[in-house]
Image (cartoon, rainbow, N blue to C red):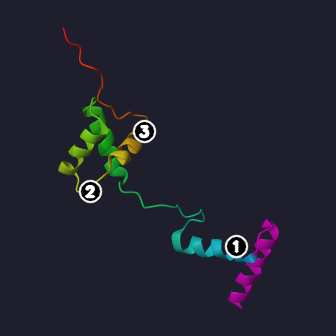
Amino acid sequence: EWVTSITTLARLDAAQLGDSQSVISRLKSRHRTTARVCDRRSGAPPVTDHNHDQYLRTSAFRHGLSNATQLQAHLPNVRVIRVSRQTIHNRLHRFNLNARRPLQATALTP
């Protein structure tokens, strides 16, 4: 009886939303397992968590003229993870910070 009421409920939801019953049941199943119904993200899982991102932000503020490669070299001394230069650049961009690039100019001779 309980199973038929769930099936009936899924049919009613599908009819009201204009989706098929399989879509509704898949969303319910996803909500039961992950507590979310949004689509799963594609790609690799994030390397850094919130604490790593905050540490990266703080060290970018402390070493204001450092570029992403220098921040990358400093990170393994404190944290165990290995983070690419591009990831550091992306995280700083998320905080509206710029990873500084070294100036490339021709040397002036007297």
Inspect the image, locate mark 2, and give the three-letter code of the amino acid beneath it. Answer: Ile
Q: Which residues are magenta?
A: 1-20
Relative vertical location of residue 99 with respect to residue 85 in this rendering, above or below: above
Q: Residue at x 27, y 20 (%)?
A: 106
**Does 44 sit above or below residue 12?**
above
Q: Nearer the viewer, residue 35 or 106?
A: 106
Q: Residue at x 59, y 62 (%)?
A: 38
User: Which residue was labeled with disc 1?
Assistant: 23
Q: Is the residue under label 3 in contact with that under label 1 (CB below 8 Å)?
A: no
Residue 68: name its quadrant.
top left
- Whole-Å distance between the Cαs marked 1 and 2? 39 Å
Q: Report helix, strand or loop for mark 1.
A: helix
- Residue drawn where x is 54% and y is 68% of the image: 35
Of 67 and 51, which appears nearest the observer? 67
Which comes sooner in the sequence, label 3 or label 2? 2
Please identify, in this view, whether the residue under mark 1 or under mark 2 is nearer the observer.
2
Give the residue type that dot 1 points to: Val
- The residue where tag 3 is placed is 93
- Against 96, residue 33 (above or below) is below
* Neighbourhood count class around disc 3 (C-alpha, 10 Å): few under 14, some 14–19, many 20 upward: few
